[in-house]
Amino acid sequence: MKMKNKMQKSADNLTRLGILEIGIALIQLFDILIHAATDQLEVLRVSSNIIILLWLALVVLGRFKPKFLLTAFGSTGLYLILNVVFLAREGLTNPEQGGELRVLLFGLVFLTTTLSAFVAYSSRGTADR
């Protein structure tokens, strides 16, 4: 009975993580699409989105299992670095939007970073990671 409960708990955790990973992927796709729709594609931002999407693809394919945390934090770290470099080059405000603060950028980066860290932390010790 204990083994069955433990297996069910493990399956529930993996399902929850799968939903988070899908959420992270959707955030990246939304970010790319919103920039494409407004004709504001930026190489640094799109590259950072692609890095996260590649990391998620590797997770789904089961690659880098022994180094899951390293790839998770490495990918998320590179994502953050590219976004910080973008902000350093382009500024905290968007002249295309009348000089408004880049609120959407901050929100998407916060969500991506937080959810990615949660996935990495929660995946420690799971057999499928």
Image (tube, grey):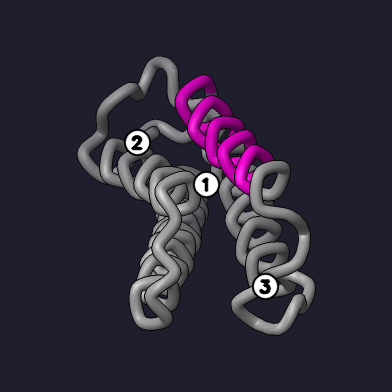
Marks 1 and 2, how far apart at CA? 20 Å
Marks 3 and 1, how far apart at CA? 59 Å
Q: Are marks 3 and 1 in contact (CB under 8 Å)?
A: no
Residue on which the image places disc 2? 128
Helix, strand or loop at label 1? It is: helix
Q: Residues within 10 Å of mark 3 (few under 14, many from 20)?
A: few
Q: Is residue 83 above or below residue 105?
A: above
Q: Residue visible at 74% across and 55% down?
A: 91
Q: Main secondary structure of the magenta part?
A: helix
Q: Give the mark count.
A: 3
Task: Choose between 50 and 122: the one closer to the eye.
Answer: 50
Q: Is residue 3 above or below residue 64?
A: below
Residue 35, position as x, y percentages in the image: 43, 72
Task: Choose between 103 and 23: the one closer to the eye.
Answer: 103
Question: Per the image, is 76 magenta?
Answer: yes
Residue on which the image places disc 1? 2
Helix, strand or loop at label 3? It is: helix
- Amino acid beneath label 3: Pro
Residue on which the image places disc 3? 95
Residue 55: quarter of image: top left
Task: Choose between 26 and 93: the one closer to the eye.
Answer: 93
In the image, the segment drawn in magenta is: 70-86
**Which-is-in-front pick, marks 1 and 2?**
2
Q: Confirm whether residue 12 shows in the render.
A: no
Q: Residues within 10 Å of mark 1 (few under 14, many from 20)?
A: few
**Which-is-in-front pick, marks 3 and 1?**
3
- Amino acid beneath label 2: Asp
Marks 2 and 3, how far apart at CA? 45 Å
Q: Residue visible at 67% across and 73% down?
A: 95
**Which-is-in-front pick, marks 2 and 3?**
3
Quarter in which the C terminus is drawn: top left
